[in-house]
Each structure stands twice: as C-alpha cells, then as structure tokens.
Image: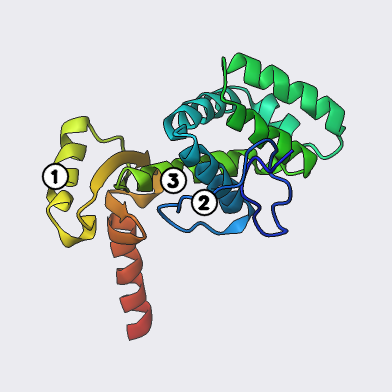
C-alpha cells in the first residue's frame, strides 16, 4: 500500500501505511530530533485529512492514561518486551482511549515496528507543541516557590501579552512550583526567560562577595 505519511528521512522509516502521496502541508514550526520528526509526519498527515484536532484529542487522552499509570510508560520503554507483546499492549492502550483515528493507530504501529515506543511521551509532547504553534499560541511558564492563584497568573499574563515578548501570539500561562527558588518568580515565555527569583539574587550577591575577596 502507498505510504500513510509522506516519507521522511531514513531516521523515520515507514512511519505508517495506507495514505496516498500528496503535497505535504507545512508544519507551523520546525522540530528537531526523532520525536520531532515523528510528530511532524503525523501533523502533516492529519492536516491532509483535516484531522488535526481529532488526533490531538486522541494523543491527549493517551498521554493522560500514560501519566496515570507509570507501568504503561515502563512497558513502552522496556526493550526486553517483544514486538508482538508490545503490539498487544498498544491495542489495549488505544482501546482505553476510545475510538481513535486511524492516523493515531498508524503512529503507534510505526513506533513499534521501528522499536521507537520509548519515544512515545516525547512524540506526544512534540505534537502538542505543533498544535500550539498552529493556533498561534505561545507558552508562558511562571515558576514560583509557592503555587500562585489564577488572578495573579492572569495579571502576569496580561502584562506580558501587551509586550513585544508575546510576539503578537496568545499566551498560554501555567504555574510551576519550585521551592528552591526561595521567592520571586522565573518567567519563561517561548525561548526567552526573565529571572526575578530570590535564589538568582542571592547567587549574584555571593558572586559579588567572592569577586571582591
């Protein structure tokens, strides 16, 4: 049968089967690494079939199932499990996710055939990144010593939304708790960061003291 996805480089052989060749839609951003290549191949195939959101729902559900059961991730990453056993495990996982798109099924079959199921979580994350870019979204991660309430996060997001850092995109704000920053916040927006943490200030102070000795 014809290739389900447009053939990529030899790093991602035979991603899946059953899709007629066509001009590949362009991904919104370029991702690197093996996970990026699989995710991009899936994205372009889904775009051809107007199934981007359907595949996204599948992968979100599967990601949730993996996150809830560490045994599933261990199973996917275990190199000693036979390909046949993993195929059966994949079918069980996809059944729990509900009625999934044929594209989603093809992805997991290809990962198994190529002994790349250990890349599953990374591939799911890479596809989510592509979909976020597709919707012109930009991740905004606010790291704090203690959890921040929604009004505080919204104030930070609103302030940054008006800045050049937002690049005219919609900011998707999330809060990461990291007690060892001591206080203040670390703001990560896209590939940029603003460090306003107490730990960073302490480190600078220590360096000044050390340099002056």
Does any portion of residue 77 appear in the rendered image?
no
Q: Tell me the quadrant of the picture where the C terminus can be found.
A: bottom left
Foreground: 6 or 80? 6
Q: Which residue is mark 1?
A: 158
Q: What mark, if any, has residue 24 been given in the picture? A: 2
Marks 3 & 1, CB-CB < 8 Å contact: no
Q: Secondary structure at mark 3?
A: helix
Q: Secondary structure at mark 1?
A: helix
Mark 2 closeness class: few <14, some 14–19, many ≥20 residues within 10 Å: some
Residue 172 lies left or right of residue 76; in this view the side is left
Q: Tell me the quadrant of the picture where the N terminus can be found.
A: top right
Foreground: 65 or 130? 130
Q: Secondary structure at mark 2?
A: loop
Marks 2 & 3, CB-CB < 8 Å contact: no
Quarter where residue 178 is shown:
top left
Sooner in the amino-acid sequence: mark 2 or mark 3: 2
Mark pair 3, 1: CA separation: 22 Å
Q: What mark, if any, has residue 129 been given in the picture? A: 3
Residue at 87% across, 32% down = 82
Sooner in the amino-acid sequence: mark 3 or mark 1: 3
Mark pair 2, 3: CA separation: 19 Å
Residue at 32% across, 84% down = 212
Foreground: 16 or 88? 16
x, y percentage for residue 29?
42, 56
Marks 1 & 2, CB-CB < 8 Å contact: no
x, y percentage for residue 189?
30, 54
Give the number of the mark in front: 2 or 3.
2
x, y percentage for residue 31?
51, 56
Residue at 15% across, 33% down = 151
Q: What mark, if any, has residue 140 been given in the picture? A: none
x, y percentage for residue 47?
46, 40
Sooner in the amino-acid sequence: mark 1 or mark 2: 2
């Amino acid at each position: 049968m014809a290739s389900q996805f447009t053939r990529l480089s030899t790093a991602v052989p035979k991603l899946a089967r059953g899709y007629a060749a066509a001009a590949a839609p362009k991904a919104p951003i370029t991702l690197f690494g093996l996970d990026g290549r699989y995710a991009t191949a899936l994205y372009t195939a889904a775009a051809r079939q107007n199934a981007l959101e359907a595949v996204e729902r599948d992968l979100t559900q599967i990601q949730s199932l993996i996150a809830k059961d560490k045994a599933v991730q261990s199973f996917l990453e275990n190199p000693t499990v036979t390909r046949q056993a993993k195929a059966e495990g994949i079918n069980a996982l996809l059944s729990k996710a509900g009625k999934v798109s044929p594209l989603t099924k093809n992805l997991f079959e290809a990962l198994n055939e190529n002994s790349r199921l250990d890349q599953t979580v990374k591939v799911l994350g890479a596809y989510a990144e592509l979909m976020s870019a597709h919707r012109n979204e930009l991740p905004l991660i606010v790291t704090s010593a203690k959890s921040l309430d929604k009004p505080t996060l919204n104030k930070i997001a609103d302030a940054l939304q008006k800045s050049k850092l937002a690049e005219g995109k919609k900011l998707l704000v999330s809060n990461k708790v990291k007690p060892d920053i001591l206080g203040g916040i670390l703001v990560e927006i896209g590939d940029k960061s603003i460090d306003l943490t107490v730990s960073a200030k302490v480190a600078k102070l220590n360096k000044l003291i050390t340099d002056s000795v």
